Image (cartoon, coloured by chain):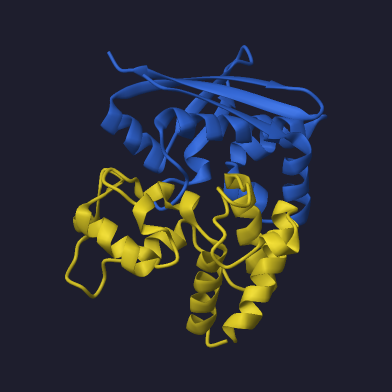
Chain colours: A blue, B yellow
Amino acid sequence: MGIGIDIVEVSRIEQMAREHEQFLTRVYTDHEITYCTKKKNKYQHFAARFAAKESVLKALGVGWGRDIKWTDVEVVNDPLGRPQINAYGGVKKLMEQKGISEILVSLSHVSHYAVASAQLVKGK
Amino acid sequence: MDEKVIYEKVKESVVEALGVDDDEVTPDAVLFDDLGAESLDLLDIVFRLEKEFGIKIPRGGIQADALAAEGENLKDEDLVVDGVLTPLGIEKMKQSMPEIDPSRITEGFRADDIATLFTVQTFVSITKKLLEEQGK
């Protein structure tokens, strides 16, 4: 069906956020910014979410561009803390075209690196 | 602004964003294949150029510009269907972005994947165009 994986250096995300004021708002949703900013190691959380967005796009077999923006993939946590994907805009449209009902995602991060993997689930 | 001046500043941004050597950056260097860039690096370059030149590079603006259907009695769906370039879209992309290796844009190519073929010159051209639009 489709899987994707991505790894990100936490320091690279921190550097982008510190050097470019538009980075966070261009890449993350308000919900993601609020969630990560509250965390002690916030850049690990931002990095894991960046990896999640990339892994979802890899699973779907597309790149960022004309029809797809970074905020079209949002990572939220359910009440048990498990990450879930909300899709919007171009990504939602693509999922509908491909008959995908859900995208599963798993995240992990340590001080230097964050990884994520995504798996597409076909609709019933 | 003179294209040579733009090129030098684009080159500087690419060197800083990618941490590559000065002499590796040439107008036809492909950012992904030749300079080892990833999508985050493209974003870094875009932000640096926006700051350096006081411009705003719209999301997907480079591709969207190359595939602009206006003024030619073309509709969007004549060029891109379900994210994939039509034969006409492929022709238009090759014409609009002559710096990109045309042999890489083949049947089934997705419009959103064009960023993987961007060269240093692609950023010089878009910067020049945006500056001209602003009368700079």
User: Residue at the location (41% across, 31% down)?
Assistant: A60
B113 to B4, vertically: above or below:
above
Which quadrant of the structure image shows residue B90? bottom left
User: Residue at the location (33% across, 63% down)?
Assistant: B94
Which residue occupies the foreground of this view, A58 or B59? A58
Which quadrant of the structure image shows residue B77? bottom left
Give the image location of residue B70, x and y in percent.
26, 71
Q: Is the N terminus of chain B in the top left, top right, bottom left or bottom right quadrant?
A: bottom right
Give the image location of residue B66, x and y in percent.
37, 65
B43 to A116, vertically: above or below:
below
Give the image location of residue B54, x and y in percent.
64, 74
User: Residue at the location (70% across, 27% down)?
Assistant: A114
Which residue occupies the foreground of this view, B86 or A32? B86
- How many marks overall? 0
Give the image location of residue A12, x and y in percent.
74, 42
Q: Is residue B46 left or right of residue A123?
A: right
Q: Is residue A50 left or right of residue B91?
A: right
A90 to B72, vertically: above or below:
above
Which residue occupies the foreground of this view, B94 or B56? B94
B111 to A52, vertically: above or below:
below
Task: Inspect this view and state whether residue A38 appears.
Answer: no
Task: Inspect this view and state whether residue B110 appears.
Answer: yes
Q: Is residue B56 left or right of residue B72?
A: right
User: Residue at the location (55% across, 71% down)?
Assistant: B124
